[in-house]
Image (cartoon, rainbow, N blue to C red):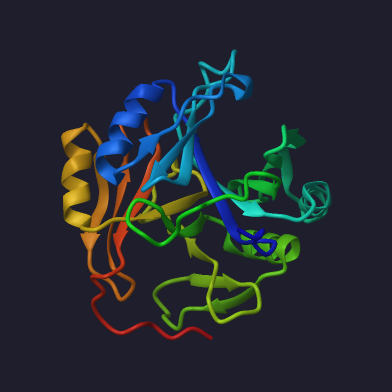
Amino acid sequence: MASRPEGTPVWSDAMFTDVEGAKTFYGDVLGWTFGESSSEYGNYTQAYRNGKAVAAVVPPMPGQDGEPQSAWCLYFASPDVAATAERIRAAGGTLLMEPMQVGTFGSMCLAQDPAGVVFGVWQAGDHVGFELEGEPGSYVWAEVFTREPEKSDAFLTSVFGYRTKKMADEHVDYKVFDLGGEQPVLGRMKMEAKDFPPEIPSHVQIYFAVDNCDTAVRKAEALKGTKIFGPMDSPFGRFATLRDPQGAVFAVIDVKTAVGEMPDFD
């Protein structure tokens, strides 16, 4: 599989204190199976759906036991992670982890935009990223939820060269980003104070496709996950936002069950 264009979402992982618990939860909710953990790389463990890599889970590194709760991290493709890191700095972002090589798999860095949104950058080597997308149990979409949309918009367009289109709805501040083609690669939602308590930081929300949104929600709740929002019908599919038992927030969406007309973007 060829490397994705720069700025394309390419991979996702999350850190869990209880990795076995995470495997049980996501194995049931999203139908994932898991490979062998790689002790050479901090027991990083890939998740698979139908034998294709879709994400990864990893335990905290030594000394990180007191870190904040688990969260999913989205990585964007880059042909040169060091060059992308320089653009991140120049655009007012912060590098949380300097560019580093991960064996023959590729190179990465972790960063934060000026509004506090954390994300990763991945320069592919042997590991090119998602092997399955848009199918049940795999990544399908992501949105930047930000309290300071002007800062996030300026940063992301500067670093990745996105074009932006705004939803034609005076009640919602929502944009999509694309890389010059017709298909958007990322969404951006303004976090309104009335909808998001102050303790929820700006973040990236990842959507995983499922066969049936309501069934996925029931499975999550049966395993002590929490429903935050939904299930709700939309022109993009029926979706819900969930929090897993260790605090990581994600969304599930059945893209086959779409209701209503697509909104206009300009």
- Residue beneath the point at 65% across and 78% down: 180
- Residue beneath the point at 49% across and 23% down: 59
Classify 265 as above or below 105.
Answer: below
Toward the viewer: 255 or 190?
255
Residue 114 at what x, y percent from top left? 67, 50
User: Left or right of 138: which side holds 158?
Assistant: right
Toward the viewer: 109 or 31?
31
Residue 68 at what x, y percent from top left? 49, 27
Q: Quadrant of residue 98?
A: top right
Residue 20 at what x, y percent from top left? 36, 23
Residue 179 at what x, y percent from top left? 65, 73
Q: Which image quadrant: the N terminus?
A: bottom right
- Residue beneath the point at 59% across and 14% down: 62
Toward the viewer: 103 or 73?
103
Classify 166 as above or below 142.
Answer: below
- Residue beneath the point at 67% across and 70% down: 162
User: Left or right of 52: which side holds 178?
Assistant: right
What residue occupies the far top of the structure in this picture? Answer: 63
